Image: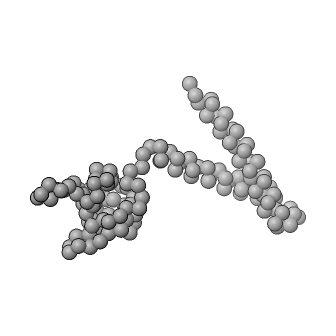
Amino acid sequence: MKGEVEKVWKNETQDGRKYEVLQINGERYSIWEEDYLDRIQEGQTLEFDFKESGDFKNITRIYEKPETGPEEKRNEYEDRNRKIIRMSCLRSASRVLTGSRIPSQERAEKTIEIAKRFEKYIDEDLAGFEDDQKP
């Protein structure tokens, strides 16, 4: 199951055991695993397994980290930007070779070669930009 956490409630049994109730996609699920208590937040997307116990749905396993820190978010952002840059370089390289009479297999290899040169040029330009931003 995968969904976005819409709401989180802290709860405690009569004998003092703590747990949380999560509302995900309009359904309520309980989580008892102490490692996850106080770490799951509203708006977070989770992939998880659950088991029904009477009227209750208990989360048995969470597949994604319940907490993504600023470093992980920055890395995800940088990875996504890197993919966008590479795709743009490939598109530009293929336009350069549009209409050429190079056989298709060689043209694919040449496109990648040109795209890598474009990417290197952009990387050098970005490195210079980052140096300019330092105090």
List x then y, in percent, for residue 118.
74, 48
Q: Is residue 37 visible?
A: yes
Identify the colour scheme used.
one colour
Q: Nearer the viewer, residue 86 or 29?
A: 29
List x then y, in percent, for residue 106.
83, 63
**Residue at left offset 62%, top offset 29%:** 132
Which residue sits furthest left?
Answer: 14
**Residue at left offset 26%, top offset 69%:** 57
Which residue sits furthest bottom?
Answer: 54
Quarter of the image for residue 122 reads: top right
Q: Is 69 left, or right, of 104 in this rendering?
A: left
Q: Is 84 left, or right, of 42 in this rendering?
A: right
Check the image and report above or below for 35 versus 24. Answer: above
**Residue at left offset 58%, top offset 28%:** 134
Total labels: the figure holds 0
Q: Is residue 98 visible?
A: no
List x then y, in percent, for residue 41.
33, 52
List x then y, in percent, for residue 52.
26, 73
Quadrant of image for the C terminus: top right
Quarter of the image for residue 49 reads: bottom left
Quadrant of image for the N terminus: bottom left
Check the image and report above or below for 41 versus 123. Answer: below
Q: Is 96 left, or right, of 134 in this rendering?
A: right
**Residue at left offset 27%, top offset 61%:** 31
Q: Nearer the viewer, residue 15 or 6?
A: 15
Q: Is 96 left, or right, of 133 in this rendering?
A: right
Which residue sits furthest right?
Answer: 101
